[in-house]
Amino acid sequence: MLLLAIPLLAGLFLVWRMPRWPAEGSQGQAPLSIIIPARNEAGNIARLLESISIQKLQPLETVVVDDHSEDDTAAIALRHGARVISSPPLPQGWRGKTWACHNGAEESRGETLLFLDADITLLPCALGRIWKVYTREKAAALSIGPYHQVRKAYEQLSAIFNIFTYAGMGSFSVCGRPDRPRGLFGPFLMIEKTAYRQVGGHAAVKGEILENMSMAPLLAKCQARTLCLPGRGLVDIRMYPDGFRSMAEGWTKAFALGADKTSPAILFTAVFWTVGAVLAALAPAFIPFGLTVREALLIYGAYALGFHWMARRVGSFSIASSLLFPIPLIFYLLVFTRSAIIRASGKPVSWRGRTIGGES
C-alpha cells in the first residue's frame, strides 16, 4: 500500500507551484494589439470582446482575423467594435491558426501583441493585472493557462487533460520555474513585437499543430525572457461546449503530438501517476485476494482527494468527478490511445472543418 503513495505524490508535484497575481493592476491604455484568430466562433466571440471592453486597462486595438468562417463570426465582431480582417487563402504548409495569427500580427499597430483564442474570457481587471506583471518582470513573452470553467457533465472528463497540459509546460512542478517553460499555452500569448519578429513569428511554426509548444524553444534560443503562469481568477476558458464528440476530437488533436514535446522527466512522472491511478481505481477488486476493505478505501480515497486537489487548480471540476475519477481516467486512456494510433498510422485528424495531419 505504501508503494502507491509514491505515484500519488509524484502526480501532486506536477502542478505544485502556482504563483500568485497582484491584487491591483494597471489602468489607462497600453500599446497593445489584441489579435484573435477566429474560425466559426459566432458562439464565443461576443463574450470575449465584451470581456475586453470592460477592462480598466484598454488595448490600443482589437483585431479579429476571420479565418474563412461559415457563420456570423465577422459580423458579430464588427458589432462589438473590433477591427475585422479576412485571412487570405491558406498557403501550402501553413495551419489555419498560425496563418491567421501571422496576418493579424502583420496588420497590428501595437508594440506588444496579445494572441487570444476566441473561447476564452478575461475576468474584470484581468488585463491590467497581467500587464503589471508583464512590465514588472520585463518579460519578452508571457503565456497564461486559462482556467477551465466546466458547465456540463461530459466536460468533467477533461480533468486529466487539463492537469497534464499544465504539467507539460514544466513551470508548475516542484522543480519547475515560471521563467523557464518548455512550452507556451496556446489560448493566451503576450509577446513583444520585436521578440516576435526576432524568432520569426508564426511563420517559424507555420506547420505545427501545437504552435505554442514549438515557439517556446525559439524564444529560449534567442535568450528572450519568457513567463508561463496560471490563469485562475484572470482568464477563463469554456473549451468544448459543442458536445462530447467535439471534446474527444479536440483532445485527440492536442495530444497526438504533445507527448514528444514534453520533457522525459515530466512524461515519466505523468505516466507513473497514471499507473498508480489505475491501480487505485482497481483497489476494491483486490479485496477478495487479501486486501482489506479499509486498505482499499484508503487507497481509492487518497487518489480521489489528490485528483481533486490537482483538478481544482486548473478548472472548476466537481468533487463528484474526483470521487468517480476512474471515469475521466478511462476517457483519458481511450483518447490518448486513439491519438497514439492516429500518429503512428499517419492518419489525419478532423477539426473545425479542416484536416489536421494531412493537407490543411
Image (cartoon, helix red, strand yellow):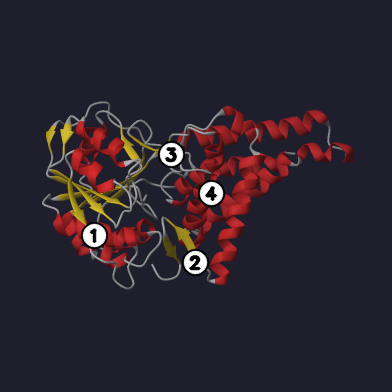
Badge 2 is on which residue?
348
Pointer 3 and pointer 2: residues touching (CB < 8 Å)?
Answer: no
Q: Residues within 10 Å of mark 1 (few under 14, many from 20)?
A: many
Q: Position of residue 109 (x, y in %)?
A: 11, 52
Q: Secondary structure at mark 4?
A: helix
Measured Cα–Cα span from mark 2 to mark 4: 16 Å
Q: Earlier in the sequence, mark 1 or mark 2?
A: 1
Of all residues, the one furthest to the bottom in this rendering is 92
Q: Earlier in the sequence, mark 4 or mark 1?
A: 1
Question: Which residue is located at x 21 percent, y 57 percent?
Answer: 86
Pointer 4 and pointer 3: residues touching (CB < 8 Å)?
Answer: no
The amino acid on which the numbered mark 4 sits, given as a three-letter code, is Arg
Q: Earlier in the sequence, mark 4 or mark 3?
A: 3
Q: Which mark is residue 245?
A: 4
Measured Cα–Cα span from mark 3 to mark 2: 36 Å
Q: Residues within 10 Å of mark 3 (few under 14, many from 20)?
A: some
Badge 3 is on which residue?
17
Of all residues, the one furthest to the top in this rendering is 23
Q: Residues within 10 Å of mark 4 (few under 14, many from 20)?
A: few
The amino acid on which the numbered mark 3 sits, given as a three-letter code, is Arg
Which of the two discs, 4 and 3, sits closer to the camera?
4
Viewer-proximal residue among 317 and 262: 317
Quarter that holds the N terminus:
top right
Measured Cα–Cα span from mark 4 to mark 1: 27 Å
Measured Cα–Cα span from mark 4 to mark 3: 33 Å
Q: Which mark is residue 87?
A: 1
Q: Earlier in the sequence, mark 2 or mark 4?
A: 4
**Is residue 4 something one can see in this rendering?**
yes
**Is residue 115 something one can see in this rendering?**
no
Q: Position of residue 124 (x, y in %)?
A: 27, 28
